[in-house]
Amino acid sequence: MNLNISTRKGRTYLYIEKGYRDENGKVKKKNVKTIGYVDELDEDHEDPIAYYKALAKKMTEEEKNKRRLTLSIDMDEKLADGAIGTKNLGYALLLKIYHELEIDKFLKGKAQKENFQFNTNSIMILLVISRLLSPGSKKKAFEEKSRYFERFDFSLDDIYRSLPHFNKISDELQRFLHESVRMKFGSDTSIIYYDVTNYYFEIKKPDDLRKYGISKEKRKRPIVQLGLAMDRNGIPLHYEIFPGNKLDQETFRSVIGEVRKNYDTGRVVVVADRGIITGDNIYYLVGSKPDQPQNGYIFSFSISGGTDSFKNYVLDDNGYTGKDGKPLGKYPDFKIKDRVIARDINVTMENGRTRKKTVYEKQIVFWSKKHCEKARAERAEIITKAEALITDPTKFTKATSYGAAAYVNNLEYDKETGEILESDKKGKHLFLNQSKIEKEEQFDGYYSIVTSELHLSPSEIVDTYRGLWEIEETFRITKSDLEARPVYVYDEENIRAHFLTCFIALTIIRLIQKRINWNYSPAKIVECLTKLECILEHENIYLFGYRNEISDYLSETFDLDFTKKRLELAAIKNILACAKNR
């Protein structure tokens, strides 16, 4: 309680007020004790304001004392039938971001046009918070719904019935999310990061979507490809799902085209790795039509796949400088150089024929001692395996010799079994390809980037490209923290809906990171929110047992109090109401 000091008709007026939250979670105040005008108060108080401030403090303490309970503990008391153990309150933060983005408003609007009876917003909330706090199948999410203080009034069948609807509205929801992020959190789309990864399925036979392709994890399972675009801050913008046999570079124009068309980005500079760089993709950005803005690119560029002239440029020590243009030391840990050059690219025209087009781009080449040592350490492990293969090839097959086989000459396999054929019978012997090793070693630690942004300095280009790790971390999050793989649904529309829930969950956790200035990783945040659990101690009183610096930081930043050891059910509902209040 606080003493309110106001001025009325030129006179000082006092009353004691108390703060509270209404049924919508809004903070309000009410008068609990009227005092009156200072000049009319009893002259017994030398300093009326000080006296009544002390009185307000005393009234606060007395109210707290009234809330103190004495619990009688029966050590032989049995658990109530159907007791569920702990309940989670950390999801209140996820609800807060979910409602700030107005996803509930969007889903309720879309549901009005459908004839189903289940609550799609309620289902989406469960799927999103479960994806972050207890990832697994849709069945697992449903079975654990009592962990939360929400009224999830739907069946498991309702969840499965909702998935085709979520798939139908996926593209529109992604665009709505971006606009909400832009308005509530801010979004910088001048730089767009793009990358592709894949997710495997525990099935043996491929279908129209799940195909055998180049798995990032070397798994021999059908996969789907996911192309993801993110803004300059690493906030997800748009994703698309492609068949597993779709090449990475073939996904680029579909995803970036959707972003350019429907996300009101203006001119963009797309950052991607060398798996995306093709003449068609470059020309798609910079060879735009006269009535469209010319976009830009910052792509990593394969040195080993470059021309002999380019390789000679890389290895030529002339032109290299240290960091920030400083002269090279005797043993530099880093060096960099750049040049602007006209380069011919092959572009597929509308008639299907290929034509050469010339682009003027800046090429940046840099070398890092740390990356050099890393590359050589990794190759040393592979060479050790290659030497073991040469010594006893019977211990290996085509699958198990992966990587090492590239450094072994005269290696042949049985086409049916994959076993290594005995080379001595053919008058050949296995030996290490030393010349290949020496050629590769020349380029250890070197990296190359090409860009249309001729005005940017080499350091600016390198720093911008390094932001691509955000999208790589994002994929790690979806595969580990969110357990987006393996996928437990089977119909194509359900698979696509599954990734929509992952996308929303990922967007929420990245926005939490942004709000806290990236001070904690997604894994740390999720771990903290998961551990903010409580157990029913006595009637409507819940006991909490977890608090750390992260939960305190989240409490302060998002105005959600996670510091109390005990909370009444009414107080918990009040916290959740505040989280849902926009």
Image (cartoon, helix red, strand yellow):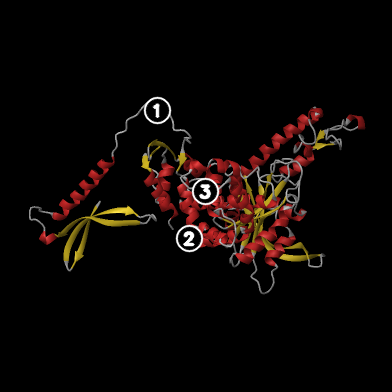
* Residue 153, numbered circle: 3
Residue sitting at x 51%, y 45%: 521
Residue sitting at x 65%, y 42%: 486
Measure the C-alpha gap from mark 3 to mark 2.
30 Å
Residue 11: % across, % down: 16, 65
Residue 338: % across, % down: 65, 57
Measure the C-alpha gap from mark 1 to mark 3.
31 Å
Q: Say left or right for 359 vs 519.
A: right
Residue sitting at x 72%, y 40%: 219
Q: Residues within 10 Å of mark 3 (few under 14, many from 20)?
A: few
The reply to whether callout 1 and callout 3 are in contact (CB within 8 Å) is no
Residue 337: % across, % down: 64, 55
Q: Residues within 10 Å of mark 2 (few under 14, many from 20)?
A: few
Outermost residue, top direction? Answer: 76
Mark 3 lies on a secondary structure that is: loop
Residue 393: % across, % down: 81, 29
Q: Quadrant of residue 429?
A: top right
**Residue assigned mark 1:** 77
Which quarter of the image is occupied by the C terminus?
Answer: bottom left
Query: Is residue 522 shown to the viewer in this render?
Result: yes
Instruction: Tell me if residue 227 comes above or below residue 135 in the rendering.
Output: below
Q: Amino acid at mark 3?
A: Asp
Q: Nearer the viewer, residue 206 or 153?
A: 153
Q: Amino acid at mark 2?
A: Lys
Outermost residue, bottom direction? Answer: 291
Query: Is residue 332 shown to the viewer in this render?
Result: no
* Residue 184, numbered circle: 2
The reply to whether callout 3 and callout 2 are in contact (CB within 8 Å) is no
